Image (spheres, rainbow, N blue to C red):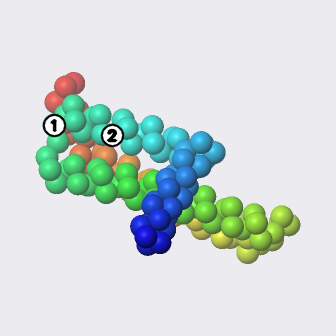
Amino acid sequence: MQNKLSFFASFFNALRGIYYCIINERHMRIHLFFAVAAVFLSWYLKISSIEWLLVVLVITLVITLEMINSAIERTVDLYTTDAHPLAQIAKDVAAGAVLFAALCALIIGAVVFLPKLCKYF
């Protein structure tokens, strides 16, 4: 019985973490907006299964890294309120990982969507 309760408690905690990021992190809401737009565009343009996999993969990557970035920022803030160079580096590197993934998602989006969109113009 204890394992089932801890499983559901862990699941609830994970959902609470996702909710926190959506409510409190502006960049998460921006990423989600573009994720929904990409899913809608994917459906509208009837992209292939492989293209769907790529789109879902980069959406997952960007959102996951944004959540990790938020966790790192909060952990650093918990540890120190002083302006420490290592704290800034930790935050900058985490933000850089999100930026890198978002640029990759942009490139993949261009490769997947631009040829199909060009047919309409």
Quadrant the N terminus occupies: bottom left
Please name the amino acid that badge 2 sits on.
Answer: Ala
Callout 2 environment at 10 Å: few (<14), some (14 to 19), or many (20+)?
some
In this rendering, would 115 be left or right of 24?
left
User: Do the CB atoms of the residues marked 2 and 1 lie less than 8 Å apart?
Assistant: no
Quadrant the C terminus occupies: top left
Camera sees residue 98? no
Callout 1 environment at 10 Å: few (<14), some (14 to 19), or many (20+)?
few
Percent from the top left, x then y, of residue 7? 44, 66
In this rendering, would 50 be left or right of 33?
left
* Residue at position x 63%, y 45% in the image: 24
Q: Earlier in the sequence, mark 2 or mark 1?
A: 2
Residue at the extreme top: 121
* Residue of label 2: 38
* Residue at position x 30%, y 39% in the image: 39
Q: Nearer the viewer, residue 35 or 95?
A: 35
Residue 46's tag is: 1
Percent from the top left, x then y, of residue 16? 55, 52
* Residue at position x 26%, y 48% in the image: 111
Q: CA distance from mark 2 to mark 1?
A: 12 Å
